[in-house]
Image (spheres, rainbow, N blue to C red):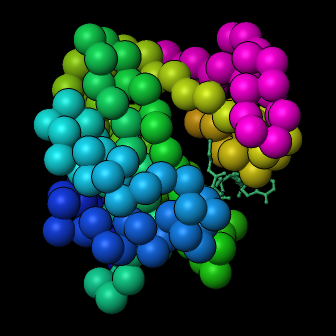
Amino acid sequence: MAVITIDPSWLAECLALDRCALQGLWTEEQWRRELEDPRRLCLGWTDAKRLLGVACGWLIADELHITVIAVDPSVRQRGHGKRLLSALLQQARQQGAIHATLEVASNNLAAIALYSDAGFQSAGTRLKYYSDGSDALIQWCRI
Ligand SMILES: CC(C)(COP(=O)(O)OP(=O)(O)OC[C@H]1O[C@@H](n2cnc3c(N)ncnc32)[C@H](O)[C@@H]1OP(=O)(O)O)[C@@H](O)C(=O)NCCC(=O)NCCS
């Protein structure tokens, strides 16, 4: 098992993981853009057969905007999310990022705990930001 940089050759695996871990959050076109854009960092967690997790972000000046982090439901709560997030923050730091930011649904307790564990703090709320009416917490971390 290893954290690796993923490129467009992982498109089908990303779509499969998105379907099972994120209920189909992004379209094929959105994943293709994420994997092709040189300003984006995309890491995968793989057992050599399957993509079991993914963490991506966008480098804008000295900020990393985390766009997605997801782990296959069958292997959650084994530290893979933590490993992926930590590797993403490390790569961003190496490329000059000083801060990381993201939005997380206020009812997503697992993700909020993961980010809080990594040092993220809430810096504001976007009310009724998601389609189910839940709020988004804006989180920041100095990396
Ligand atoms: C959020 C997610 C990526 C966590 O992945 P994971 O591999 O299960 O996380 P880890 O095992 O590395 O756990 C890291 C920390 O997160 C927290 N955590 C993870 N799952 C949790 C849960 N179900 N309940 C409460 N805290 C949880 C804990 O603080 C944990 O640290 P600990 O094990 O030392 O207590 C995973 O639940 C997921 O893919 N969720 C669906 C996609 C999603 O919501 N992504 C975030 C969008 S902003």
**127 part of magenta stretch:** yes
Q: Position of residue 37 (x, y in %)?
A: 19, 39
Q: Residue at x 63, y 63 (%)?
A: 23
Specify whether residue 83 is in view: yes
Q: Residue at x 49, y 45 (%)?
A: 68
**99 part of magenta stretch:** no
Q: In the picture provided, is 1 more to the left or to the right than 40?
A: right
Q: Position of residue 56 (x, y in %)?
A: 38, 44
Eyeballing the image, is 128 above or below 118? above
Give residue 9's quadrant in the image.
bottom left
Q: What is the magenta range?
A: 120-143
Q: In the picture provided, is 81 more to the left or to the right than 105?
A: left
Ligand 1 quadrant assignment:
bottom right
Q: Position of residue 110 (x, y in %)?
A: 76, 51
Of the 4 image quadrants, the one containing the C terminus is top left
Specify whether residue 119 is in view: no
Q: Residue at x 37, y 16 (%)?
A: 63
Residue nearer the viewer, 77 or 17 = 17
Residue nearer the viewer, 92 or 21 = 21
Residue nearer the viewer, 26 or 54 = 26
Q: In the picture provided, is 77 more to the left or to the right than 60?
A: right
